[in-house]
Image: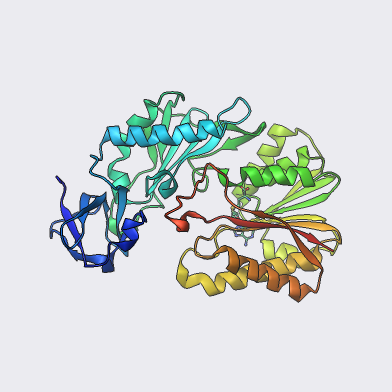
Amino acid sequence: MSNPIITLKRGKEDSLNRFHPWVFSGAIATMPENLEEGDIVDVVTHDGRHIGVGHYQVGSIMVRILDFGTTSIDQEFFATRLAEALKLRKALRLDREDNDAYRLVHGEGDFLPGLIVDIYGNTAVVQAHSPGMHFARTAIANALVSLDGIEIKNVYYKSETTLPYKAQLDPQNDYLIGGFETNIAIENGLKFHVDWLKGQKTGFFVDQRDNRSLLEHFARGRKVLNMFCYTGGFSFYAMRGGAELVHSVDSSAKAITLTDANVELNFPGDARHKSYAEDAFKFLDSMEKDSYDLIVLDPPAFAKHRSALKNALRGYQRLNAKAFEKISSGGILFTFSCSQAVNKDQFRLAVFSAAAQSRRKVRILHQLTQPADHPINIYHPEGEYLKGLILYVE
Ligand code: SAH
């Protein structure tokens, strides 16, 4: 063991023995005084048995375990983990001529807690959620461009809003390797401008790919309302699926500009599409009943933390109640929650309450989740965050 040592309290190794990768502050008995955020540490039980090696940080989660062995955390370590991550995406057949946007690294789901990497063509957008990953960014970037089986030319680092503010790391969003201003990525044959410089998250929501595909199959002849559209993902799938009309709504004018540009890219001059820079709740309040028979509700995370859970559930109920009230009979509702703090059952209960409030007959057709390039480490159930339902409303 060559790293600083964190010793656990007696009996606090149980979850780690089950390969859950987090060490909470309350589990720690002793640690060196001069430990710095982002340091690589060895974690041992009260009687000195080695558990694993991980990144230390200040907070309720104090260590994120990178390896339940004694591996050195260096460029070779990242090269190996990234190669394993790529192998899975290749098996999922996500890098094809008609699809070059996907998540390469999904934190704990790829045994790299604190790290997100999204691929858009030959650009990788890297996001660190822990100081340890911030300090490893150069090693990660070098490992990315050296990967066999994929040609990554640009690595953009985007962690200004994802690192703990108190750590005072002052991360700058910038290219670590290469440099390229704009990009057009392809998802299932549809094209998207991806603005990783100014866009939300890494520039695009790759996690709705499979759910957008499902929507395409429901869209024929329907009047579609895509609420919280961001860059318009669901809208183009609906158009390709033969929707009669598609209306996209987002409160951000910038998102609406992106949506319009993406419609133009895929369906130039197509009059079926209209977009509105408006608040979703107000839009639903003021729209006529029966204007739409396919509605998508994909709001931002209402609960970013557990403390906001109650309000978040009320928010989901209120939003869904408005949709149930207005959707045509025989309508299809795609409704989502991406709040990690809200679990599947809580979300379903909020939607159930909204349905009951509207007194409509509602049936669940599909239960949706995140796609396979956002895998859930079986020992880390917290990795499941995206939940959705497709409902048939009479
Ligand atoms: N469905 C999108 C992702 C949605 S992200 C996709 O497939 O890519 C959530 C979006 O909700 C953001 O674009 C944000 O600008 C928007 N938003 C947040 N609050 C809103 C509100 N009150 N009304 C309308 N849009 C809102």
The residue sitting at 38% across, 31% down in the picture is: 144
The residue sitting at 42% across, 43% down in the picture is: 110
**Above or below: residue 385 compared with residue 208:** below
Q: Position of residue 276 (x, y in %)?
A: 71, 53
**Above or below: residue 268 compared with residue 60:** above
**Colour scheme used in the picture?**
rainbow
The residue sitting at 78% across, 34% down in the picture is: 269
Q: Where is residue 321 in the image (x, y as percent from the top left)?
A: 72, 70
- Indicate left or right for 130 with 106 as reference: left
The residue sitting at 38% across, 27% down in the picture is: 145
**Total numbered labels placed on residues in the image:** 0
Residue 246, visible in the rendered structure: yes
Q: Where is residue 283 in the image (x, y as percent from the top left)?
A: 73, 62
What is the quadrant of residue 26 in the picture? Answer: bottom left
Residue 286, visible in the rendered structure: no
Q: Position of residue 218 (x, y in %)?
A: 78, 47
* Quadrant of the image where one finds ligand 1: bottom right
- Indicate left or right for 175 with 74 as reference: right
Camera-side residue: 307 or 110?
Answer: 110
Camera-side residue: 211 or 45?
Answer: 45
**Above or below: residue 303 compared with residue 222:** below
What is the quadrant of residue 60 in the picture? Answer: bottom left
Camera-side residue: 389 or 268?
Answer: 389
Quadrant of image for the C terminus: bottom right
What is the quadrant of residue 344 in the picture? Answer: bottom right
